[in-house]
Image (cartoon, rainbow, N blue to C red):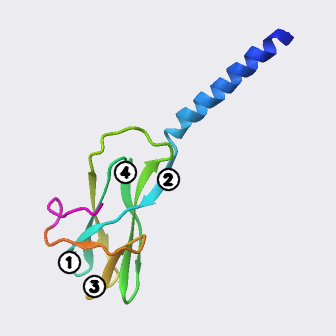
Amino acid sequence: MKRLRGPVKVVVIVAVVVGLGYLSLYLRWPVERPLAYWLVSDTRLGIVVGDAGSLSCDVANVDESPDAVVVHARCWERVVPVPQPAMLQAYPMEVTLQAPLGSRTVRDGSGNLGMVCSNPFPDCTIPG
């Protein structure tokens, strides 16, 4: 019985490492992304974010103040990076504001100014 303890420990350790590696492919965390935007109407913004290795992107929330509109656009990325093509994937979305944009600035969740687009997606340049 004592002879089997060593090999059993090795098998258990290998199984745990393989299980954690497999599980890490499914663990995700949100990352704030820079954005570009265009006016759809006084109270609607079209926004586009881009990321190469994302699983998906969405708008977490929108904070409005008298001076600025902060759009928290996040992309879900794997905790453990998986090799993928470096091609930029665009994620266009729309955001409804509580008040007209007017002269307020649009910022991303990190505080960077959003890029204004004269044309809607797909002609809008995504900041990198």
Residue at 39 percent of width and 38 percent of height? 83
Q: Earlier in the sequence, mark 4 or mark 2?
A: 2
Q: Nearer the viewer, residue 103 or 127?
A: 127
Rounded to the nearest angstrom, the CA distance separating label 2 from label 3 is 32 Å
> Which picture quadrant has residue 119?
bottom left
Three-letter residue code for mark 2: Trp
Q: Position of residue 66 (x, y in %)?
A: 38, 90
Q: In which quadrant is the C terminus drawn?
A: bottom left
The residue tagged 3 is 100
Q: Which mark is residue 53?
A: none
Element at label 1: strand
Residue at 18 percent of width and 71 percent of height? 117
Q: Position of residue 54 (x, y in %)?
A: 37, 49
Q: Is residue 81 found left or right of 52 in the rendered image? A: right
Rounded to the nearest angstrom, the CA distance separating label 3 from label 4 is 28 Å
Q: Earlier in the sequence, mark 3 or mark 1?
A: 1
Q: Is residue 8 found left or right of 66 in the rendered image? A: right
Q: Which mark is residue 41?
A: 1
Three-letter residue code for mark 4: Ser
The residue tagged 4 is 56
